[in-house]
Amino acid sequence: MFDYLPEDLPCLETLRVWHTLWLTRIHAKIAAVQKRQAEVEQGRRRRPEPPDWTVELGIGAGRPPIQVHAGDCYMAGKRRRPIGRDEARRLLADGLRPCTHCRPDAQLDVPGLPRGIAPALCSLPQGHQHHEHSPSPAARRS
């Protein structure tokens, strides 16, 4: 039925060599893909679990904490470190800003925080009041 092969022996030998070379390449590629898939799966099994909570760190000397996140929050920056539940609650209670995306303040149910309002949004820090940095209406007219 599918006997479209040539009748002469040199052509048949050439086809056999050619197909053998292709089968060798195909087997090598299958082995490489299987090895890569096994490595990916092994990496997936060995990957550590994300921390429950993280604190995002600022830039500069001492890298002060700037925001608390859930461990799997997609908005956490690159400068962060894992923290425990108690430290996350303490930082939030001390006034550190919670992430508005993962809402660690709601998840941790920190006592003393108004429900649904981030501490940093409740009041401006000392020295950042609007009237201290804006010229008075009289100064603007002159």
Image: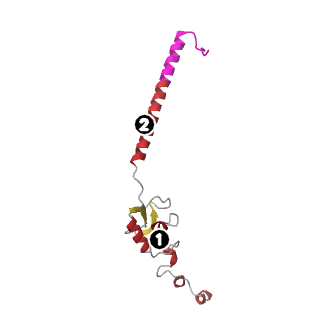
Identify which amino acid the numbered label 1 is placed on: Arg
Measured from the top left, where is residue 124 in percent x and y?
Answer: 50, 79
Residue beneath disc 1:
97
- The x and y percentages for residue 44 are 43, 46
CA gap, disc 2 and disc 1: 46 Å
| Circle nearer the N terminus (2, 1) | 2
Q: Residues within 10 Å of mark 1 (few under 14, many from 20)?
A: many
Q: Which residues are magenta?
A: 1-22
Q: Nearer the viewer, residue 133 or 93?
A: 93
Q: Residue at x 53, y 10 (%)?
A: 9
**Rendered view: 48 above or below 9:** below
| Mark 2 residue type | Lys
Report the residue that reaches farthest toward the left: 62
Q: Is residue 8 above or below residue 136?
A: above
Q: Which residue is mark 2?
A: 35
In this picture the colour scheme is secondary structure
